[in-house]
Amino acid sequence: MACFLVSAGEALVVMGAKYIVRHQENKFALAVRSGEKASRDTTKFGAEVPWSKKLGYLELTLWGGAFLLAGEHVLHGEVVPYPPFLTAASSPEDTATMLHEMGTVGVTMAAVLTIAWGIGVLVVDYLKYSKHQKKMVSTAEGAK
């Protein structure tokens, strides 16, 4: 009924976090360019792809899921273009059912998307880090 609102809400939170992280990354890049000592080691695990980009992937995933589900709810007549917009909000009994669905299905769906994103980030970071380590070892061996 309205489970897509949970993903949309999480996407808004992630969007805000992404902009804060991007601001911090830009501030760090300016400090490095101006000659200040870099406080972050770029050879650490997960440093190849900036966190703002990783959060952008999560944001796109959540928005995509929310729009897909919203479209499905429109097709089934659960969301209408006139107030109260959500047909379940027309009676207190339906509203209770809608809130229960949001708390169960919506939260579970958003959690599964976030966990899948987290696993994907870990796998990609591991692959990039191991490739970087192999490159560093081969470069060190070639220098000998």
Image (cartoon, grey):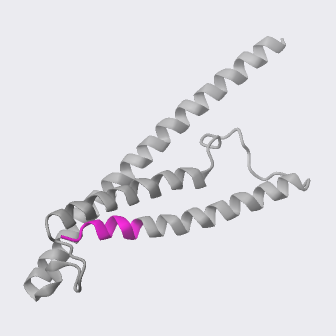
The residue located at (73%, 59%) in the rendering is 26
**Image x and y of residue 50, in percent:** 63, 49
The residue located at (51%, 65%) in the rendering is 15
Closer to us: 124 or 82? 82
Q: Is residue 57 left or right of residue 34?
A: left
Question: In this picture, is 117 found above or below 73?
Answer: above
Closer to us: 96 or 70? 70
Quadrant location of the C terminus?
top right
Q: Is residue 4 magenta?
A: yes
Q: Is residue 77 left or right of residue 135?
A: left
Residue sitting farthest toward the right:
35
Closer to us: 90 or 58? 90
Quadrant location of the N terminus?
bottom left
Question: In this picture, is 105 found above or below 131?
Answer: below
Residue sitting farthest toward the front:
81
What span is in magenta? 1-10
The residue located at (82%, 51%) in the rendering is 38
**Image x and y of residue 87, in percent:** 15, 79
Name the quadrant containing residue 98.
bottom left
State how many labels appear. 0
Q: Is residue 140 left or right of residue 60?
A: right
Question: In this picture, is 28 found above or below 81?
Answer: above
